[in-house]
Image (cartoon, helix red, strand yellow):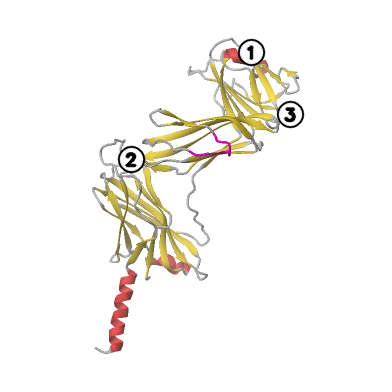
Amino acid sequence: MRKSNLISVISFICCSLMAQQAVWLDTVRSSAPLQNERIAFKAVNTNREPVRFSYALEEGNAIVPGQAFVAESRGYTLQTNGAQLVSGVELPTTVPGALVRISALNTSQPVDQNLAIQPQNLVLVTPANRVLTQNQGIELLANPVQDGESLFPEGTAVFRVKPEHGAGLFVLFADQLEISDTPYLIQVQEKDSPAIATLQASMDHIAIGQNQTASMQLLGFKALSTSLVAVAANGQRTDLGVLPSNGLLSWTVPAQPGMVEVVGHVEGIFRGLKVIRDIRTVFHVSVPTARFASDIAMNLEKEIPLVKVGVEVARSGRYEVRGVWFGLNARGQEEAMAVAQSASWLNGNGFVEVEFDPAWAEVRGLKAPFRFGNLELVDQTQMAVLQNQSRGIELRGF
């Protein structure tokens, strides 16, 4: 065989191998140990039919990786009763024009109007010790006795403190209300206040066996006291401690299946005024039934090529792989070109096949290497995100 022919054959073989090369760009093994049947959960989706779905994205459609949700609070909630409302309830504010909502916490249907707070019976004492009656100090937004449709439930009074009365410590009285232990909920919102509390869990989805961390930050004010509690799906409450002096809080949350709510309460000082902030956020804890495996294969025999993503499975179920395809433009910059997601029923370790259509790149003039990024592995049986791989998989040789 001539040397030139030998070189051609070798080049052809190398190109063919490169055309099928797919590699992980991240370490794929999750730190959460897999669980089989030891922990039970309610099966939500038991469909065993495989599904593949993909669609091209228009040029300029930027895809930003999902970020953990950041809760923000400019308000607080007080739970009181009829006796306390008659004797007066303090409502600290930091800016003029606070929005106040009062509801009777009763479950009777229809609503017992004898328990509803009548706005004309409210007495408001301002920070300047002015006593305002007959709605003098408030702008009524919702009446407890509704005529027709309303944004608020019947029995709810909503009003705005008139801005001319400034900010500071108000005291609210409910005149002619029966002295009782009937519970009432008062919610105060200050949408223009610079005194803000934020709360963020580091991950919106975690698996049993992993530790969750979260942070709370106070903007514009100093905390005097804090309390934080994690409430699990089964109602179990865990005290998470207090906010340290550096203004940041992080903690390890016990992992249990289901939704976990983190509830924070902060009292502090803002420009010499008392400030209260209540804040909460949630995250989901799943049973780690599967994780990405290092195995990747390709199927080029189909009209649309398939990338076979390996999944290590501890419990039979329906598993989904979803992500975004990227290619390089003429400037060497990545552009999102398509979204692909596939689901299959797996009884053990196996593959979920995801579509890769070279036409997506040809239409946009994008070139290799192509990347399947922003990957998520979802257990559709329990409807839970099990794993995220930001960088994902790269195809080479196309």
Query: Label 3: which residue?
Result: 166
The crowding category of the residue bearing disc 3, from other C-alpha atoms within 10 Å (few below 14, some 14 to 19, many at least 20), is some
Kindly identify the amino acid type of the residue bearing the numbered disc 1: Ser
Q: Which residue is mark 1?
A: 87
For the record, the magenta segment spans 243-250
Mark 3 or 1, nearer chain start? 1
Q: Percent from the top left, x then y, of residue 328?
A: 47, 67
Kindly state the secondary structure of the residue where label 1 is placed: helix
11 over 221 or under it: above or below: below
Give above or below for 122 relative to 40: above
Residue 172 in sight in this render: yes
Identify which amino acid the numbered label 3 is placed on.
Answer: Gly
Q: Main secondary structure of the magenta part?
A: loop
Expressed as whole percent of the image width and height from the top left, the position of residue 296 reads 31, 60
Left or right placement of residue 306 versus residue 127 in this view = left
The numbered dot on residue 394 is none
Q: Residue at x 52, y 18 (%)?
A: 111
The kind of secondary structure element at disc 3 is loop
Which residue lies under the disc numbered 2?
A: 287
The image shows residue 39 at horizontal and vertical percentages of: 29, 36
